Image (tube, rainbow, N blue to C red):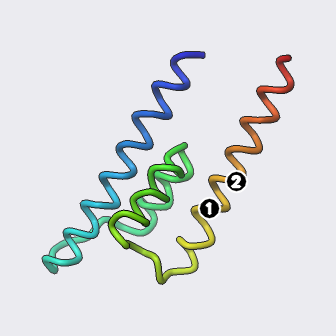
Amino acid sequence: MEYIWIYLLVVNVLAFFIYGDDKARARRGVWRISERTLILMALIGGSMGALFGMAVFHHKTRHKKFTIGVPFILALQVLIGAMLFFEHL
């Protein structure tokens, strides 16, 4: 079980920094990280980090794919986590 928490910590920190890096790249006008990769980071468990990255860096906050999609992914992940937790009680 502790491996799951370590994984979630790592993937969320990584997602946060990837969102920040993409914002920095956007400001410099250089090659960007694809939206597909940004969404994928949320899907693989980094939705909390992605959401914090969006808020802290003010990144992708005008795109419905992100403003609706990332919180939706987070809600699904929390729901699935809660179901798995209560299933084992």
Q: Which residue is mark 1?
A: 71
In depth, the one of 30 and 16 nearer the eye is 16
Above-or-below relation of 59 to 71: below
For residue 81, side relative to residue 4 (left or right): right
Q: Quadrant of the N terminus?
A: top right
How packed is label 1: few (under 14 Cα within 10 Å), some, or many (20 or more)?
some
Helix, strand or loop at mark 1: helix
| Amino acid type indicated by mark 2 | Ala
Q: Tell me which residue sits at (63%, 53%) in the image.
A: 74
On residue 37, the disc is none
Residue 83: x percent and y percent?
82, 34
The Cα atoms of the two marked residues, 1 and 2, are separated by 6 Å
Above-or-below relation of 15 to 10: below
Residue 88's image quarter? top right
Helix, strand or loop at mark 2: helix
Above-or-below relation of 16 to 10: below
Above-or-below relation of 85 to 62: above
The answer to whether marks 1 and 2 mark residues whose Cβ atoms lie closer than 8 Å is yes
Residue 57's image quarter? bottom left
Q: Tell me which residue sits at (70%, 53%) in the image.
A: 75
| Amino acid type indicated by mark 1 | Pro
How packed is label 2: few (under 14 Cα within 10 Å), some, or many (20 or more)?
some
Residue 37: x percent and y percent?
41, 59
Q: Tell me which residue sits at (37%, 42%) in the image.
A: 13
Q: Which residue is mark 2?
A: 75
Looking at the rendered structure, the number of numbered marks drawn on it comes to: 2
